[in-house]
Every structure is written in C-alpha cells, then in structure tokens.
Amino acid sequence: MTGVDAQQTDPYLWLEEVTGDRALDWARAHNEVVDERFATSDRFSGLEHRILDMLDTDTRIAYPTRRGSWLYNFWRDAEHPKGLWRRTTFEEYATTDPAWEVLIDLDTLAAAEDENWVWGGAAVLRPEQSLALISLSRGGADAKVVREFDMATKQFREPASPEHPDADGFLLPEAKSQLHWIDADNVYVGTDFGPGSLTDSGYPRIVKRWRRGTPLEQAETVFEGESGDVMVSAGYDRTPGYERHYVARATDFFNEEVHLLEDDGTLRFIDVPSDASESWYKDWMLVRLKTEWTPEPDGATYPAGALLAIDLERFLTGARDFDVVFTPDAHTSLHGYGWTEHYLVLITLEDVQTKLYVVTPGDWERKPLADAPPMATTSVMNLDPLEGGDEFMLVSSGFTTPGTLLASSVGGATTPLKQEPGFFDAGGIVTEQFFATSDDGTQVPYFVIRHRDRIGTPGPTVMSGYGGFEVSRTPAYSGASGMGWLERGGTWVMTNIRGGGEYGPQWHTQAQKAERHRVYEDFSAIAKDLVGRDITTASQLGAVGGSNGGLLMGVMLTRYPELFGAIVCQVPLLDMKRYHLLLAGASWIAEYGDPDKPEEWEYISKYSPYQNTDPDRAYPPILFTTSTRDDRVHPGHARKMAALLEEQGHTIWYHENIEGGHGGAADNKQMAFQAALIYEFFTQMLLDDPAR
C-alpha cells in the first residue's frame, strides 16, 4: 500500500469534521474550481436548463401510491421546487388533466418555519386515511423529524407543551427514527431515547409502544436488541381477521430475526433462516431463501433463490412441508412479488429482462400475467390486497423508451393510463446486450446503448456500475443521459456485475466479504470486453458509480487505471479502514467485512482505495461529488481521497453540495446541476479531447 497506511495517523482526519470551518472552506474552494472549469459555458447551461425543464415539466407521469380509493403523489416542479404532497381518486387520475387535492405545500411550510425541509415520506393510517405521520429532513439527510398530520384540517397536530398543554399530537425530533401506526391512538416507536438506545450503526436498538397523550418517556418497551445489531423495529398487520403484531431484530444488514408479538407480550419466533425474507398474507407465509435450506423434520432441501409457501399457523406448530412457488435456474431469478386480494404476482428476471406471472395460492399454479417488452423493465406497482381487489398498475420503460403506466387486474384488461414523452432524440439509438468473461470464467451481462451508426467504430463510452447489497440494475429510461451523452454521440453502458441480485441471491453472495474482488474483476472484464468488441478504446472509456458504486470507482482508479480515460465517483465509500466508524458504516460490515479483525482487514486492505493510492502511477482524471448533508455515507470519504490524490500530484476535481443527503441533491435544480456537471465532465474528458 502506498496510500494512507493504516498504521499511521491519517493526515486528513480533519476533513471528517462534517461542518468544521476548515473542512467547509476546503470544500468551497474546490467547488469554485469545478464551477469555473465545468459550469460556466453555454453548453453546460443549455444542458442544465434542459434537464431542469424535464424534471419540472407537468408532462412527466405523476406516479401514484395507492391506498384504497385514494392515489397519493409527491410532486416537484418549477413553481414548487420543494414539492407538494397531494392525492386524487383513480377516476380523476385517469383523466388527461386530473384535479389534485393538495395536502401539504412543502415550500410554504419551509418558508413559514424557516427550515430547509426535504420530503421524507408519509405513513397514512388505514383504512380511515384521516391521519398521517409525515417525515421531513433538513437538507435531505437520513435523519428526519416525524410529525402527525390531520388530513381533514390539513394541519400538523401539535404535541403537548407548556404552550399547548391539551395537545396530543405525535412528534419525534430529528433522528433516524421509526414510527408505525397501530391504531389512531397508538404507535410503535424506535428513536434516540438517550444514551444506549441506538445501535453502533446509529439506528434504534429499542422499540416501544407509545400511546397518544402520554410523554415519549412513558412509552412501554416491547423489544430490545443488542448494540451490535443494525436496528430493531415493530409493526402491525391490520388485515381484517388476521391482525398481527410483530417485532424484528436485524443482527446485520442481511440477517434478521422476526417474532410475532402476542397480546400478553410473549414472542413467537418465525423459525426460518435469518438471511431469508419472510412475509405473510392472511393464512399464508412466504419465504424467499438466500441460501440453501433443509428444514427439519421435513428433510427436503430447497435451493437459494427459491420462494416457498406454507400455512402460517401450521408452520408455527411445527409443519415444514412447504410448497415451492418458484425455483431459480442459471438464467432466471425472482425479482419481486406481491399480493392482490386473491392472487400472488411474481416478477422474474431472465438474463436481466423482466417476465410477469400470476400464481393461484393453494395449488400455486403459475401463468403469464402480461407481456413485457424486451430490453425494458416492466414492474407491478400499487398492489393493495386490503382494499384494492385484484387490481394493480404496470409501469414499463427502456433505455430509449419513456415510461408507460397501465391499469390492469388479474384476468382483466390492461388499459394505458399515462405515457411519458421522450426528452431526447432517440432516433437511430439501439440497445444491445453482451456478456463478458470475468477472471474466474463467469459470464457477466451488460447493456450497450448507442447510435446504430457507431456500430463498428470505437467511440467515447461511459459505463456505470454498482455491484453490491443484492441490488439489481435493470433497463430504465434516463432523459439526462440521453440529452447529456447519447445525443452528443456517446455510448452508454449499464453493467450487471456480481454483488447485485440480477441472477438471484448467489449473484450477490459470490461477491461478499473475502470474495469482493469479483465485483472489480467483473467490471474490469466488461471494460476490456468493450475495447475488444471495438465499442470504445481505453482512452475514450469513462466510468461512473455512486455510494457502493463510488467504492467501485475508487478501486477502478487505483487498481485498473489503464482501462479508463475518466471517472466520476459519487457519494463514495473509499477509506475502508474507517468506514465502519463513520455514520451508518457499521451496518455494512456484513457486506464488506470488519476492518478491526486482522483476518478481514487482510482482504479489505488489498482494495481499499484510500490505502492503495500510488503517486507514481498514472491515473485518469477523476471527479468526486458528495454532499455535506449525507448522513449515510460520510462526506469525509470523498474529501480525504481527493485531498490525498491532489497531494500526490494526480488530476482531481471535487464538488460538494452543502445539502442534498445521500442522493446528493435536495431538489430538481440541484439534481439538474449535478447531472449536467457529470456529463460536461465526461464531454470534456472523452468527447472534446479523447487523448486526455
């Protein structure tokens, strides 16, 4: 290692002081350099305005969330940059110009309260839908304030205070909290109750039952985890006739213990593998396996990636004779599933392309549900088994095909609801899928999006990647990349490297901890394959990734610099010796390993970018972007790496949004700036002068 040696004092620890004056002055100075170089031209301004117009236009689909007869939507546009929370009926939504009932105008609220509120979501009490728990963050952070909202008066309910002694609204101050409805007068709450109440990852360790009109300090503890857990939580299933309370303890990012909570406070353990995902609906429990399982006393062995079903009460009394709902194969994995009132809907990925099926519970017969176009992603949304019958919505889009929203039902017709316009000239642009051979012989898929005239001629190309936490990346429309890159003659590549979930849980587990090197081998293999197929050259190839994908970019820079002409590294993890000590980092030990354990640091140290920089090696130019308000991945990662590389004489650019959270942007204007900055960087590095 020639970067910051783990045994030496880190000279850039001061850059971990998130809001320290010295650190912010350093960030602002670098922002000025980036702004001057990339954000002052007419080309940049033109692209920024086009992207902002796309984000603000009312021709976009207002994708709704269905809760019974109401469709809810959070909407931002030029007149409402912070956004509106609103609702309408399905009948009204189906019209060309639906009328919305505005519940919260976040711009008005933020101005009245002198707060930089960013929307964090709403939990509406069912079935009455007269109350909601609203989450708001300052500047886009993960930590949020939670406040109770009255849907009839459209006012926040005041909590008890000396000024309002008779008030009884629920309110939680800023924290990484959980607040879940039980009924109109009771909630489950996990928050910062004081010293010892949070896990090492910064999430709730204790969950309590809190009754309206009583101080939070008097809430009754129902479950506690350990400090080394990721978090604990509690919830309530309000399905009529099947009401159930439950608690869960996440022992790490991928393992969880779930119990049903009886009225007398006793716990009934759901005895399935801790890395499995279990859920229930009415009589049925579903179990999706992440690893192979042979439950006793049944004796049958079920493969990783399978979806199993069993009667929940029979399971709790010892039965283990599961029905197999889905079994994966070498090309097909289960991407998602959900219930209508009478049926189970499955979404599969077949070589990263979606297929939809409907399953009848009991006999578990599987039939095709609807056609899904190739080279696109079709998803099922707005399943509502409690109040929505067998109706649902479908949304479909591809790299060059804007989103289409359709209404459907099991056994019924499929009707187009909304069609998004195209935001860039896609004429002549084609999508292809290829497979690269990784170092261990594994075939790794990727998509190439380019103009047909570029086929056979190497050209400027940008490849994106993530490769972690079983997150699957599937085709989707991106107006920003179309405007900023494809229209300019560039080629776009989306990779499906291991660490993701495109081929089921084993595609992820093959690349955990000591096997993480496979993520980087897969991505570099695709980079070489792109050159081998004459799609690009190394000097014309760029790469971009964020968060865990930002770690991927850091490894590409330090381990495979000769493969790239430019790199963009967004909200990244980079100092893997200290990642578990910063913000939510401890929650990811199950993914990367524990650097405090010598045997695990042994393999982490081989790729940790901050420990593997080399002042004597030629690196491609790199742009780091992050946010001061990111309280998930610490901005210190990007700050320290940029400072170290700069000291070593490498070409770096660094831009830090002073707000924006882990997404890097808090509103449409910030999102437009960030996107335009990235494509202007790649344009200058790869299109204007490919020799750079």
Image: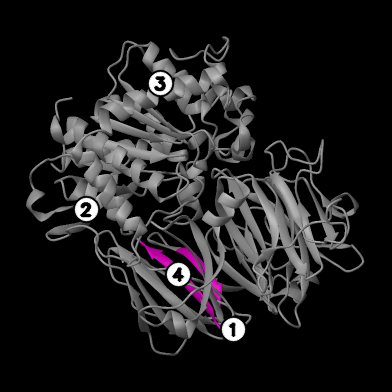
The amino acid type of the residue labelled 3 equals Ala
- Which residue lies at the image location 89% right of the left edge and 62% below the top edge? 266
Closer to the chain start, of discs 1 and 3, is: 3
- In the rendered structure, which segment of residues is drawn in magenta? 334-350
**Residue 347 got which mark?**
4
Q: Is residue 518 left or right of residue 73?
A: left
Judged left or right of residue 622, residue 265 is right
Residue 628 to residue 403: above or below: above
The quarter of the image holding the C terminus is: top left
Q: Could you tell me if the residues under marks 2 and 1 are in contact, i.e. CB atoms within 8 Å?
A: no
Residue at numbered disc 3: 29
Confirm whether the magenta stretch covers residue 336. yes
Q: Is residue 128 visible to us here?
A: yes
Q: Secondary structure at mark 4?
A: strand
> Given the image, on which type of amino acid does mark 1 rest?
Glu
Looking at marks 3 and 4 on the same chain, the residue that comes earlier in the sequence is marked by 3
The residue that disc 2 covers is 449
**Relative to the observer, which residue lies in front, 300 or 26?**
26
> Dot 1: what SS?
loop
